[in-house]
Amino acid sequence: MDSYNAVERIFPDRENYLKALPTEPLTERELDRLDDFLDSIGDEAMTLEMLDGFFAALICSPQLIMPSEWLPAVLGNNAPFTTTKEGEQVLGLLIRHWNTIADDLRQTLHDEEAVYFPVLSLDASGAALANEWAFGFMSGVEMRHGSWHELFDDDDYAGALVPILMLCHEHDPDPESRTNPAGLEDRENVIQMMIAGLPHIYRFFEPHRRARATEDAPQSARLKVDKIGRNEPCPCGSERKYKHCCGANASTLH
């Protein structure tokens, strides 16, 4: 079976499909199932932690990115769907996790104490590293990098990106681009700064998302009718005055 047949066959009826999905966050068991599936694909697919960061960036983004575009970035080009049902189940888990992140970030617009806690894996010592989450986030930024320049250039909000960039570039292949190890000595604090900065990033682009929603909303069709003077030539082309032609039978509106 072609890699994406199992998922793309859902798209024609995606509205009814998405309405039928459970609305609650993924359970630990469902997160483990999604993690196992991503791991089964191999290096082409994102890890669960990377996926979480990737979704967070796409949800914060000022530009809309559809599932048909981000799905290959998540699963790679050789996702081993064996049945349409399996594709539906995986897509369902992905969409539900997207919605959880979106709902939690949206809550931060109205509640200053609200926060989204990212899904972070733990190392052998039980500590979170957050490198993969940060890499996933920056991968999401790269999908629409040009639209993020406004945030990078903003003196008040750009600082929210600093801990993400520090974690993302800790092991950069280019030695000159790697994060100074001294900056990550208190990794837990850097991760807390990253979590605290997410609502600021989300709020920064909220006006863009609102404007986008307005542009995407269907516009009411309006018929523009110019008022015709009674003594003007009739627009039907008869060369008679409007009041003696088509205007003679026009109803008066009150």
Image (tube, helix red, strand yellow):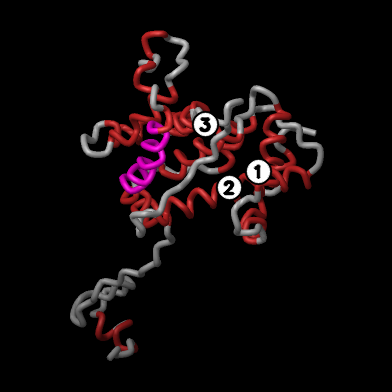
Q: Main secondary structure of the magenta part?
A: helix
Residue 188 picture quarter: top left
Q: Which residues are magenta?
A: 189-204
The residue where tag 3 is placed is 128
The residue where tag 2 is placed is 97
Residue 158 picture quarter: top left
The answer to which of marks 2 and 3 sits earlier in the sequence is: 2
Q: Are circles 2 and 1 on residues that touch, CB within 8 Å? A: yes
Residue density around tag 2, few if under 14, some if 14–19, many if 20 or more, within 10 Å: many
**Image location of residue 243, percent across then percent down:** 25, 85
Distance of label 2 from label 3 (alpha carbons): 20 Å
The residue drawn where x is 71% and y is 28% is: 41
The answer to which of marks 2 and 1 sits earlier in the sequence is: 1
Relative to 39, residue 93 above or below? below
Mark 2 or 3: in front is: 3
Instruction: Specify the quadrant that holds the C terminus.
Output: bottom left
The residue where tag 1 is placed is 31
Distance of label 3 from label 1 (alpha carbons): 17 Å
The residue drawn where x is 39% and y is 27% is: 186
